[in-house]
Image (tube, helix red, strand yellow):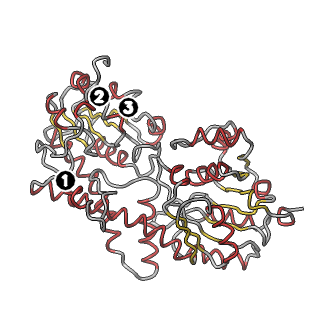
Amino acid sequence: MTSADTAMDDGTIAVIGAGYVGLVTAAWLAETGRHVRVVEEAPERLDQLRRGIAPIHESGLQELLTAVMDDGRLSVTDDIADAVRGAGIVFIAVGTPPLPDGGADLRQVRAALGQLKKHVGATTVVVIKSTVPPGTTQALIESSRRDRLKAPVLTCPEFLREGSALHDCRHPSRVVIGGDDESAQARVAALFEELNTVVMQTDATSAEMIKYGSNAFLALKISFINEMARLCELIGGNIDVVADGLGTDPRIGRAFLNAGLGFGGSCFPKDVAALDETAGLHGHYFWLLKAATEVNLQQRRRFVVKVQEAVGGSLSGKRMAVLGLAFKAGTDDLRQAPSIDVIRQLVDFGAHVAAYDAVAGPKAAEIIPNVTICADAYECVRGADAVLVVTEWPEFITLDWRRIAGLVRRRIIVDGRNLLDEHVLADLGFTYVPVGRRPGKKSLRRRNASALLPSPAVG
């Protein structure tokens, strides 16, 4: 007897894929009282999960994973047939990595649907949680029917922010469910009925457009503020003040108006490229997306130029200390991280690079060759000609900068995130180079200066 012949139970959920989206979603569903079976085929990740170890860094995830596994509400397997047996709803949360042309690689999604055809019947709801380009789910619905997959297929895009993904599961800004089976949509919507949020039920393509449109718009916002930052540097403005002023307008808002090294990670670069590729396939040239991507790349090059200028023009033989490797604070994700482009350019120019990231450091050695990965920040900065702030980890604010002043060879800081307090650093003899204002022009937005200085008992 296959699972298609057994009674389905919406209190039993299967999640195919234990990446950022799949594992966090599965843990949250288990927290709400459902019984969740997670399918993971990658041997190393599967082994970690079976030992109760979260293979990704995400705030609160390890603690929740331990709790729901100890209670028997979440289990892990590499057998799809076993996972979907009796499950009323199956989420597909496999990877859709970018292709060279910018499109999304859908092979894992199609493979999962192909396996489900053998094991689920018409009473199971299949939900694509993976990020797929607009039009994909509708095409998969039509092809699945031809391939005799009896289960209705929906899409339920994720809107999780790495570093706060679990919080976003518990407190979503909205839930979007797309498809053409209203009964199946209602069953998926019931999973979120206890949350105080908007649940939108629409067609599959509109749901996908909401997902891609959201990420593309935020990417545009980041690139816009970085272009404004460059103009501020040229004419003497202060981007921090400008961003605050723009953000007070409720039509604009302050979020994602932080000038710096641009966007990275697994979502924004990939989704912008995929939406642009989708537009091209339908004869539309999406100029705004192309510009946002170019600005994002250029921002990293500009940062390296700032470093060159700060140390006198040549990077050859100089020792650079890079603080932060993850694409943003709160995660260990290095996908499309600005640090990778910055470090590669520094090495190409002949610099010797040491780097530190308490969370992402262990992964970095495999990705970024010719770089010394340090165990702590003070080891990283020792003998440096310049200290480069690349990821906005709060830890860097509370470092003992007086101690660092005695460890570096030259007191130069190039802050790609405008994270540090230049007033305090200037008092310690540092030359501070920010983003979006001319070096030496102090910000009017003064941070708490004591945050940069250790207590007398430290160091």
Q: Residue at x 71, y 56 (%)?
A: 14
Marks 2,3: beta carbons within 8 A: no
Marks 2,1: beta carbons within 8 A: no
> Which x, y percent locates residue 112?
68, 62
Residue 354, by quadrant, is top left
Mark carried by residue 372:
3
User: Hey, what amino acid is under mark 3?
Assistant: Thr
| Above or below, comparing residue 6 to residue 263 in the picture | below
| Secondary structure of the residue carrying numbered label 1 | helix
Closer to the N terminus: mark 1 or mark 3? 1
| Above or below, comparing residue 94 to residue 370 in the picture | below
- Mark 1 residue crowding within 10 angstroms, few (<14) / some (14–19) / many (20+): some
| Above or below, comparing residue 450 to residue 192 in the picture | above
Q: Which quadrant would the N terminus be assigned to in this image?
A: bottom right
Q: Residue at x 67, y 50 (%)?
A: 30
Left or right of 28? Residue 416 is left
| Residue sitting nearer the eye, 114 or 451 | 451
The residue singled out by tag 1 in the image is 241
User: Hey, what amino acid is under mark 1?
Assistant: Val
Q: Separation of disc 2 and disc 3 at Cα?
A: 11 Å
The residue singled out by tag 2 in the image is 381
> Which x, y percent locates residue 27?
63, 48
Looking at the image, the residue that sits furthest to the bottom is 283
Mark nearest the camera among 2 and 1 is 1
Looking at the image, the residue that sits furthest to the right is 1
Q: Residue at x 22, y 21 (%)?
A: 406
| Secondary structure of the residue carrying numbered label 3 | strand
> Which x, y percent locates residue 298?
27, 57
Left or right of 425? Residue 286 is right
| Secondary structure of the residue carrying numbered label 2 | helix
